[in-house]
Image (cartoon, rainbow, N blue to C red):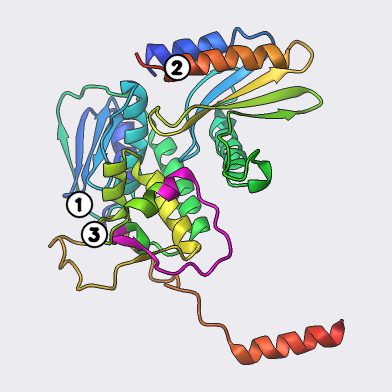
Amino acid sequence: MADIPEVLGSLERARGTGSLRVGEEGALHIRRGLVTGAESRHAPGAGGHDPELAALLALFDAAYFLLGSDAEPVFTEEPVDAASPGITVATLVHEQRRRRGLLDAAWPDGAVDVAPVEPVRRVRRQRVILTGLQAEILLNADGTRTPAELARDLGRTAFACLLAVRGLAAASLLRTEAPEPEAARTGTPRPGPAPRPELPAEWAPADQDLLTRLRTALVELG
Amino acid sequence: MGVRIDDCLARMMTIPGAQRVTLVDCASGLAVAAAGREDLVDQHEDAAGATDVVRAVLTAPALSATPAGDDVEEIIVCGTDGYHLLALTGADLDGHLFVHLLLDREKGNLALARLRMRGLVDEMTGPK
């Protein structure tokens, strides 16, 4: 399995200049060992008021997906335009881990990252607090677009949408479309960081007997 | 970083008492630009921590002025040794950003800093 951070590390030590293509996922652009740009097919490209700021946000957004990819990296030496100041591999790796931690803290199941999402029909809560972006996602989720596609259409970073979507999944306000045959929709492999099978897809159903006994014990204590 | 943003941060550092200023992407907690006192190792940790505060305030109905929820422009933390001013940009810049200004308690003037920050943040987010 390819380890993208490792390959980037050796390019950094060699102070290489060129592009590191990561399978069909995208590419990282490197100048004198530092990463100056990145694009991923899961992240919308740069766009917005300030070109440098947009490029930097897009770089970290794309790097989140590329650093977690299993695809085979291929390096080509070529001149590279610097869209952003060079970022060290250590910074990229640190940021990728931190972002994955944030996502998992919001909701530990990555399945919602890559599947088309739709709002639930019934809200089983008395009140709901949403961020602006979460509201935008609920209003636009139509069961055909993945969070990455919503990010592109809403003009947000993919990571912002992933985080919002995980929060919505945790609040049971959003769900993935009914499971479909793998790769049937796009004919391509599952995108995004590999799903983590060791984590439960849903909370296990509550054990009614246990809850009853717990309640009895608590009542006795009180 | 672009001249425009670096220039804005440099001007924020001229606010009396300013010790450090960081521009943070609210969606990810990434520090995208900084000026002033160099604690580079902690810069990203600080940005992530400040982002948690911003998120907590934005999602707390208790800290809204109206039932519908008003926009938050600034969050101010007054410590015994310094002020933290978190100034949020509007929704129309590239993603949502905020500026974290650390102000010396003795040399700084909170009212003045707020006024200057608001002007500079508007300038930064305004049309080119």
Q: Which residue is mark 3?
A: A144
Q: Horizontal and vertical percent for residue B36?
A: 58, 15
By secondary structure, the bulk of the magenta-drawn segment is best described as loop
Q: Is residue A41 magenta?
A: no
Cα gap from disc 1 to disc 3, whole angstroms: 29 Å
Residue A110 image position (x, y, % from top left): 39, 61
Q: Nearer the viewer, residue B99 or A20?
A: B99
Residue sticking out furthest to the right: A222
Q: Which residue is mark 2?
A: B124
- Report the Cα–Cα distance between label 1 and label 2: 41 Å
Q: Nearer the viewer, mark 1 or mark 3?
A: 3
What type is the residue that disc 2 sits on? Met
What amino acid is found at the position of numbered circle 3 in the picture?
Thr
For the N terminus of chain A, the image quarter is bottom left
Q: Looking at the image, which residue is at 32% across and 51% down?
A: A140
Does A141 appear above or below A177? above
Q: Is residue A85 visible?
A: no
Find residue A106 and report its horizontal and vertical position in percent.
51, 56
What is the x, y in percent for residue A28? 25, 37
Q: Do we see residue B36 in this rendering?
A: yes
